[in-house]
Amino acid sequence: MSRYTNKIQAYLDRKPDFNTEVILQDDGQGAYIKEWNATDKPKPTDAQLDALSSQAETLEKNAIAVANRQKEYGSIASQIEFITEKGLEAWKTNVQSIKTKYPKESE
């Protein structure tokens, strides 16, 4: 269902609240919009959402890259410890190497 939610996010150009604004359901034949309460745009057609497949794939890949980055960055406390022990420039270099290791695609 994540590909479908990413299509909706691409359509709205933001992440909606999937508990109140856009309620999805899957009865075994694929996800569909059960309720559309987002007021900034009308409910999209399946064709409109299908046209956003590549954007949804980019959102999905970027979410994976961000999750991988966050794991490697570690907690805020461990980052502060890194800065304290090795300095701000070393931390910046480390952050850049992690970003290079897990690049995000252009949106």
Image (cartoon, grey):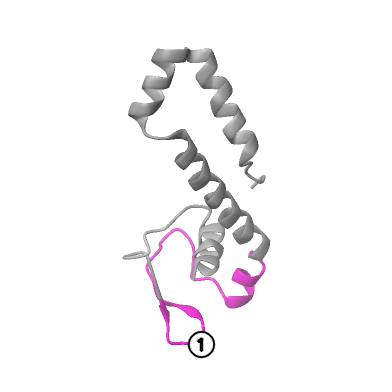
Few, some or many residues within 10 Å of mark 1 (<14, 14–19, 20+) = few
Q: Where is residue 51 in the image (x, y as percent from the top left)?
A: 67, 68
How many numbered discs, if any? 1
Taking 24 as reference, is 8 above or below it?
above
The foreground one among 34 and 70 is: 70
Q: In which quarter of the image is residue 53?
A: bottom right
Q: Where is residue 29 in the image (x, y as percent from the top left)?
A: 51, 87
Q: Position of residue 91 (x, y in %)?
A: 50, 20
Taking 2 as reference, is 101 above or below it?
above
Residue found at x 41% / y 35%: 74
User: In the visual, does 84 lie left or right of 53?
Assistant: left
Stretch of the chain drawn in magenta: 25-52
Residue found at x 39% / y 14%: 84
Q: In which quarter of the image is residue 103?
A: top right
For disc 1, the marked residue is 29
The foreground one among 85 and 105 is: 85
Check disc 1 and give the amino acid type.
Answer: Gln
Q: Does the magenta stretch include residue 66?
A: no
Secondary structure of the residue carrying tag 1 is loop
Q: Does the magenta stretch include residue 31?
A: yes
Residue found at x 56% / y 61%: 11
